Image (cartoon, rainbow, N blue to C red):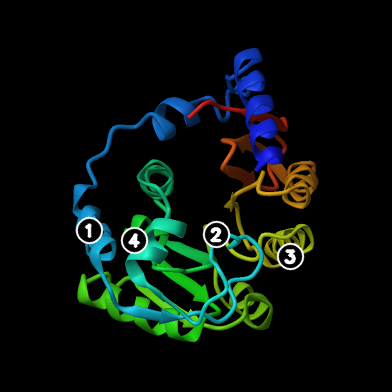
Protein backbone atom coordinates (compact mmCIF):
# COMPACT_ATOMS: atom_id res chain seq x y z
CA UNK A 1 0.00 0.00 0.00
CA UNK A 2 2.82 2.42 0.89
CA UNK A 3 4.43 1.73 -2.48
CA UNK A 4 1.25 2.65 -4.37
CA UNK A 5 0.74 5.82 -2.31
CA UNK A 6 4.29 6.94 -3.05
CA UNK A 7 3.90 6.18 -6.76
CA UNK A 8 0.60 8.07 -6.87
CA UNK A 9 2.30 11.16 -5.46
CA UNK A 10 4.98 10.87 -8.16
CA UNK A 11 2.20 10.48 -10.73
CA UNK A 12 0.54 13.69 -9.53
CA UNK A 13 3.87 15.50 -9.74
CA UNK A 14 4.38 14.34 -13.33
CA UNK A 15 0.88 15.56 -14.19
CA UNK A 16 1.66 18.99 -12.77
CA UNK A 17 4.93 19.20 -14.67
CA UNK A 18 3.44 18.20 -18.01
CA UNK A 19 0.10 16.68 -18.95
CA UNK A 20 -0.02 17.36 -22.66
CA UNK A 21 0.64 15.27 -25.75
CA UNK A 22 3.06 17.19 -27.96
CA UNK A 23 3.10 14.85 -30.95
CA UNK A 24 0.50 16.15 -33.40
CA UNK A 25 -0.18 12.58 -34.53
CA UNK A 26 -1.69 11.85 -31.10
CA UNK A 27 -2.79 15.29 -29.85
CA UNK A 28 -6.43 14.26 -30.26
CA UNK A 29 -6.19 11.57 -27.59
CA UNK A 30 -6.99 13.63 -24.51
CA UNK A 31 -9.83 15.72 -25.90
CA UNK A 32 -11.46 13.22 -28.26
CA UNK A 33 -10.95 10.05 -26.24
CA UNK A 34 -10.44 10.69 -22.53
CA UNK A 35 -12.73 13.73 -22.30
CA UNK A 36 -15.38 12.44 -24.72
CA UNK A 37 -18.92 12.66 -23.29
CA UNK A 38 -20.78 9.37 -23.39
CA UNK A 39 -23.94 7.83 -21.98
CA UNK A 40 -23.55 4.18 -21.03
CA UNK A 41 -26.10 4.02 -18.24
CA UNK A 42 -27.35 0.73 -19.72
CA UNK A 43 -24.27 -0.96 -18.22
CA UNK A 44 -25.55 -0.08 -14.76
CA UNK A 45 -28.11 -2.88 -15.08
CA UNK A 46 -25.51 -5.62 -14.92
CA UNK A 47 -23.46 -3.69 -12.35
CA UNK A 48 -26.51 -3.51 -10.09
CA UNK A 49 -27.17 -7.20 -10.63
CA UNK A 50 -23.69 -8.07 -9.39
CA UNK A 51 -23.96 -5.64 -6.52
CA UNK A 52 -26.76 -7.69 -4.95
CA UNK A 53 -26.04 -11.22 -6.20
CA UNK A 54 -25.54 -13.88 -3.53
CA UNK A 55 -24.54 -16.62 -5.97
CA UNK A 56 -21.37 -18.29 -4.76
CA UNK A 57 -18.30 -18.70 -6.94
CA UNK A 58 -15.61 -21.26 -6.21
CA UNK A 59 -12.19 -19.71 -5.78
CA UNK A 60 -9.47 -21.48 -7.70
CA UNK A 61 -6.47 -19.32 -8.62
CA UNK A 62 -6.69 -15.59 -9.19
CA UNK A 63 -2.94 -15.23 -9.49
CA UNK A 64 -0.86 -12.17 -8.65
CA UNK A 65 -2.91 -9.02 -8.43
CA UNK A 66 -5.74 -10.39 -6.31
CA UNK A 67 -4.35 -9.85 -2.84
CA UNK A 68 -7.75 -8.47 -1.80
CA UNK A 69 -9.22 -11.99 -2.05
CA UNK A 70 -8.76 -13.84 1.22
CA UNK A 71 -7.99 -17.54 1.34
CA UNK A 72 -11.41 -19.21 1.22
CA UNK A 73 -13.33 -21.78 -0.79
CA UNK A 74 -16.18 -19.64 -2.13
CA UNK A 75 -17.01 -15.98 -2.55
CA UNK A 76 -20.36 -14.35 -3.28
CA UNK A 77 -20.68 -12.49 -6.58
CA UNK A 78 -21.51 -9.26 -4.74
CA UNK A 79 -18.35 -9.52 -2.63
CA UNK A 80 -16.20 -10.24 -5.66
CA UNK A 81 -17.81 -7.26 -7.39
CA UNK A 82 -16.87 -4.95 -4.52
CA UNK A 83 -13.28 -6.20 -4.46
CA UNK A 84 -12.24 -6.49 -8.10
CA UNK A 85 -14.86 -5.02 -10.48
CA UNK A 86 -13.56 -2.31 -12.78
CA UNK A 87 -14.72 1.16 -11.78
CA UNK A 88 -17.05 3.16 -14.01
CA UNK A 89 -14.28 5.72 -14.51
CA UNK A 90 -11.86 3.24 -16.05
CA UNK A 91 -14.51 1.14 -17.73
CA UNK A 92 -15.47 4.26 -19.67
CA UNK A 93 -11.92 4.54 -21.02
CA UNK A 94 -12.26 1.10 -22.59
CA UNK A 95 -15.61 2.07 -24.07
CA UNK A 96 -14.16 5.29 -25.50
CA UNK A 97 -11.20 3.51 -27.06
CA UNK A 98 -13.55 1.07 -28.81
CA UNK A 99 -15.77 3.91 -29.98
CA UNK A 100 -13.15 6.40 -31.22
CA UNK A 101 -10.84 3.94 -32.96
CA UNK A 102 -13.79 1.91 -34.31
CA UNK A 103 -12.31 -1.26 -32.85
CA UNK A 104 -13.89 -4.44 -34.17
CA UNK A 105 -11.96 -7.19 -32.38
CA UNK A 106 -10.70 -7.31 -28.79
CA UNK A 107 -8.76 -9.79 -26.67
CA UNK A 108 -8.94 -9.60 -22.88
CA UNK A 109 -6.75 -11.50 -20.43
CA UNK A 110 -8.67 -11.76 -17.16
CA UNK A 111 -12.47 -11.91 -17.40
CA UNK A 112 -13.48 -11.94 -13.74
CA UNK A 113 -17.18 -10.91 -13.70
CA UNK A 114 -16.99 -9.69 -17.30
CA UNK A 115 -17.59 -6.02 -16.61
CA UNK A 116 -14.51 -4.84 -18.51
CA UNK A 117 -15.70 -6.91 -21.46
CA UNK A 118 -19.13 -5.31 -21.19
CA UNK A 119 -17.58 -1.85 -21.63
CA UNK A 120 -15.91 -3.14 -24.81
CA UNK A 121 -18.94 -5.06 -26.11
CA UNK A 122 -19.49 -2.77 -29.12
CA UNK A 123 -16.66 -4.85 -30.56
CA UNK A 124 -16.32 -8.62 -30.73
CA UNK A 125 -14.63 -9.56 -27.46
CA UNK A 126 -12.72 -12.74 -26.68
CA UNK A 127 -12.00 -12.87 -22.96
CA UNK A 128 -10.00 -15.51 -21.08
CA UNK A 129 -10.62 -16.60 -17.48
CA UNK A 130 -8.58 -19.26 -15.68
CA UNK A 131 -11.14 -19.99 -12.94
CA UNK A 132 -13.57 -22.51 -14.43
CA UNK A 133 -16.49 -21.79 -12.09
CA UNK A 134 -16.11 -18.04 -12.54
CA UNK A 135 -15.80 -18.39 -16.33
CA UNK A 136 -18.96 -20.51 -16.56
CA UNK A 137 -21.05 -18.28 -14.32
CA UNK A 138 -19.85 -15.08 -15.95
CA UNK A 139 -20.71 -16.48 -19.38
CA UNK A 140 -24.19 -17.26 -18.03
CA UNK A 141 -24.62 -13.73 -16.63
CA UNK A 142 -23.47 -12.10 -19.87
CA UNK A 143 -25.90 -14.18 -21.91
CA UNK A 144 -28.67 -13.26 -19.47
CA UNK A 145 -28.02 -9.57 -20.22
CA UNK A 146 -27.74 -10.17 -23.98
CA UNK A 147 -24.03 -9.43 -24.33
CA UNK A 148 -23.75 -11.83 -27.24
CA UNK A 149 -20.61 -10.24 -28.69
CA UNK A 150 -18.56 -11.52 -25.74
CA UNK A 151 -17.02 -15.00 -25.85
CA UNK A 152 -15.67 -16.30 -22.52
CA UNK A 153 -12.91 -18.91 -22.77
CA UNK A 154 -11.86 -20.92 -19.72
CA UNK A 155 -8.10 -21.43 -19.97
CA UNK A 156 -4.79 -20.44 -18.47
CA UNK A 157 -3.38 -17.50 -20.45
CA UNK A 158 -0.08 -19.19 -21.25
CA UNK A 159 -1.81 -22.20 -22.81
CA UNK A 160 -3.91 -20.29 -25.33
CA UNK A 161 -2.55 -16.78 -25.88
CA UNK A 162 -0.15 -17.45 -28.73
CA UNK A 163 -2.67 -19.57 -30.65
CA UNK A 164 -5.30 -16.86 -30.38
CA UNK A 165 -2.86 -14.17 -31.50
CA UNK A 166 -1.75 -16.28 -34.48
CA UNK A 167 -5.29 -16.92 -35.68
CA UNK A 168 -6.90 -13.53 -35.04
CA UNK A 169 -6.25 -9.89 -35.83
CA UNK A 170 -7.03 -8.12 -32.56
CA UNK A 171 -7.01 -4.33 -32.68
CA UNK A 172 -7.12 -3.85 -28.91
CA UNK A 173 -5.76 -6.10 -26.17
CA UNK A 174 -6.62 -5.54 -22.51
CA UNK A 175 -4.25 -7.27 -20.07
CA UNK A 176 -5.79 -7.57 -16.62
CA UNK A 177 -4.47 -10.77 -15.12
CA UNK A 178 -1.34 -12.28 -13.58
CA UNK A 179 0.06 -8.97 -12.38
CA UNK A 180 3.72 -9.95 -12.32
CA UNK A 181 6.69 -8.41 -14.08
CA UNK A 182 7.62 -11.50 -16.08
CA UNK A 183 4.07 -12.37 -17.15
CA UNK A 184 3.30 -8.80 -18.24
CA UNK A 185 6.46 -8.62 -20.34
CA UNK A 186 5.87 -12.08 -21.81
CA UNK A 187 2.30 -11.19 -22.83
CA UNK A 188 3.49 -7.92 -24.34
CA UNK A 189 6.19 -9.63 -26.38
CA UNK A 190 3.70 -12.22 -27.63
CA UNK A 191 1.46 -9.39 -28.79
CA UNK A 192 4.38 -7.79 -30.63
CA UNK A 193 5.38 -11.09 -32.24
CA UNK A 194 1.99 -12.02 -33.62
CA UNK A 195 0.18 -8.70 -34.17
CA UNK A 196 -0.54 -8.15 -37.85
CA UNK A 197 -1.38 -4.44 -37.85
CA UNK A 198 -1.44 -1.44 -35.56
CA UNK A 199 -2.76 -2.31 -32.11
CA UNK A 200 -3.58 -0.69 -28.80
CA UNK A 201 -2.63 -2.55 -25.62
CA UNK A 202 -4.04 -1.53 -22.25
CA UNK A 203 -2.32 -2.75 -19.09
CA UNK A 204 -4.17 -2.66 -15.77
CA UNK A 205 -2.51 -1.79 -12.44
CA UNK A 206 0.85 -0.65 -13.78
CA UNK A 207 1.82 0.52 -10.27
CA UNK A 208 0.47 -2.51 -8.43
CA UNK A 209 4.00 -3.44 -7.37
CA UNK A 210 7.64 -2.72 -8.11
CA UNK A 211 7.56 -5.58 -10.58
CA UNK A 212 4.63 -4.10 -12.47
CA UNK A 213 6.34 -0.71 -12.51
CA UNK A 214 9.45 -2.36 -13.98
CA UNK A 215 7.33 -4.12 -16.59
CA UNK A 216 5.66 -0.84 -17.59
CA UNK A 217 9.07 0.84 -17.95
CA UNK A 218 10.26 -2.00 -20.17
CA UNK A 219 7.11 -1.99 -22.29
CA UNK A 220 7.00 1.71 -23.07
CA UNK A 221 10.66 1.74 -24.14
CA UNK A 222 10.05 -0.82 -26.90
CA UNK A 223 10.80 0.66 -30.33
CA UNK A 224 7.41 -0.49 -31.66
CA UNK A 225 5.59 1.64 -29.06
CA UNK A 226 4.97 5.05 -30.62
CA UNK A 227 2.78 6.42 -27.84
CA UNK A 228 2.65 5.40 -24.17
CA UNK A 229 0.11 6.98 -21.83
CA UNK A 230 0.36 6.72 -18.06
CA UNK A 231 -3.03 7.13 -16.31
CA UNK A 232 -1.66 5.63 -13.08
CA UNK A 233 -4.06 2.69 -12.99
CA UNK A 234 -4.00 2.10 -16.74
CA UNK A 235 -1.00 2.12 -19.01
CA UNK A 236 -1.95 2.47 -22.68
CA UNK A 237 0.44 1.86 -25.57
CA UNK A 238 -0.12 2.41 -29.27
CA UNK A 239 1.97 0.11 -31.44
CA UNK A 240 2.65 0.64 -35.12
CA UNK A 241 5.41 0.39 -37.71
CA UNK A 242 4.96 3.92 -39.02
CA UNK A 243 7.91 6.27 -38.97
CA UNK A 244 6.54 8.75 -36.44
CA UNK A 245 8.05 10.37 -33.38
CA UNK A 246 7.88 8.35 -30.18
CA UNK A 247 6.23 9.93 -27.13
CA UNK A 248 5.72 8.98 -23.47
CA UNK A 249 3.20 11.07 -21.57
CA UNK A 250 1.48 11.14 -18.18
CA UNK A 251 -2.11 12.39 -18.24
CA UNK A 252 -4.41 13.35 -15.41
CA UNK A 253 -7.70 11.50 -15.57
- State the separation of the CA atoms marked 4 and 1: 13 Å
- Looking at the image, which is closer to me, 67 or 168? 67
| Residue 241 in the image, given as x and y percentages of width and height | 70, 47
Q: Which callout, 4 or 2, points at the residue further toward the start of the chain?
A: 2
Element marked by disc 4? helix
Mark sitting on residue 48: 1
Q: Which callout, 1 or 2, points at the residue further toward the start of the chain?
A: 1
Report which residue position mark 4 lands on: 118
- State the separation of the CA atoms marked 3 and 1: 33 Å
Q: Which callout, 4 or 1, points at the residue further toward the start of the chain?
A: 1
Element marked by disc 2? loop
Residue 220 vertical placement versus 129 (above, below): above
Q: Which quadrant of the figure has residue 48?
A: bottom left
| Residue 87 in the image, given as x and y percentages of width and height | 40, 48
Front disc: 3 or 1: 1
Residue 125 vertical placement versus 13 (above, below): below
Give neighbour class at mark 2: few <14, some 14-19, many 20+ (Cα, 10 Å). few
- Looking at the image, which is closer to me, 46 or 119? 46
Q: Which callout, 4 or 3, points at the residue further toward the start of the chain?
A: 4
Report which residue position mark 3 lands on: 183
| Residue 214 in the image, given as x and y percentages of width and height | 79, 47
- State the separation of the CA atoms marked 4 and 2: 23 Å
Left or right: 234, with 149 as reference point: right
- State the separation of the CA atoms marked 1 and 2: 21 Å
Residue beneath the point at 52% across and 77% down: 72
Residue 213 vertical placement versus 7 (above, below): below
- State the separation of the CA atoms marked 3 and 2: 20 Å
Report which residue position mark 2 lands on: 68
- Looking at the image, which is closer to me, 241 or 49? 49
Amino acid sequence: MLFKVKEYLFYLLRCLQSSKIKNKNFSFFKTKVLLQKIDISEINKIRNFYKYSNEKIKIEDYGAGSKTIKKQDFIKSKDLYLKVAISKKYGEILYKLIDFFEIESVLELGTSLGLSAVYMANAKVTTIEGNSDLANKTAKYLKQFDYNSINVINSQFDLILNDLLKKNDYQLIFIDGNHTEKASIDYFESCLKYSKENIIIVFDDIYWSKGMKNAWKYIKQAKEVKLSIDLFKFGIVYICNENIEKEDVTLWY
